[in-house]
Amino acid sequence: MKEVTLQVAGMSCNHCVKAVEGALQPLGVQGKVDLADNKVKVSFDESKVSLDQIKAAIEDQGYDVA
């Protein structure tokens, strides 16, 4: 499993946490949102999903990934 921490702008509440973490689950990605630092730590299998797919799933929820 690879672990990466992404900067994500626009998250401010529990709904944001559920939206981001929920968007990652269908991809088989474990995500942990840190609202205070606007970061999402993701753990994923590189043979099954790419970092670009993870970023796209978060952006589809309306957040900006740096």
Image (cartoon, rainbow, N blue to C red):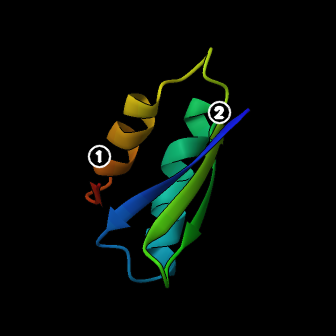
Residue at the (60%, 17%) spot, across then down: 48
Q: Specify the quadrant of the image occupied by residue 33.
A: bottom right
Label 2: which secondary element: loop
First in sequence: mark 1 vs mark 2: 2
Position of residue 3 in the picture relative to residue 14 (left or right): right
Tell me: residue 9, above or below residue 13.
above
Q: Quadrant of the C terminus?
A: bottom left
Residue 64 pos. (x, y %): 25, 58
Q: Residue at x 38, y 49 (%)?
A: 58
Residue identified by numbered label 2: 28
Q: Nearer the viewer, residue 46 or 61?
A: 46
Mark 2: few, some, or many residues within 10 Å (few <14, many ≥20)?
some
Q: Check the image and report above or below for 28 versus 59.
A: above
Query: What kind of residue is marked 1?
Result: Asp
The percent coordinates of residue 47 (x first, y second) are: 62, 14
Label 1 Cα crowd, 10 Å radius (few <14 / some 14-19 / many 20+): few
Q: Farthest residue toward the right?
A: 1
Mark count = 2
Name the residue carrying label 1.
60
The quarter of the picture where residue 9 lies is bottom left
Secondary structure category for the residue under label 1: loop
Q: Position of residue 18 (x, y in %)?
A: 53, 65
Q: Quadrant of residue 54?
A: top left
Identify residue type, mark 2: Gly
CA gap between label 1 and label 2 equals 16 Å
Question: Dividing the image into 4 quarters, which one contains the N terminus?
Answer: top right
Q: Nearer the viewer, residue 43 or 27?
A: 43
Query: What residue is drawn where x is 51% and y is 69%?
Result: 17
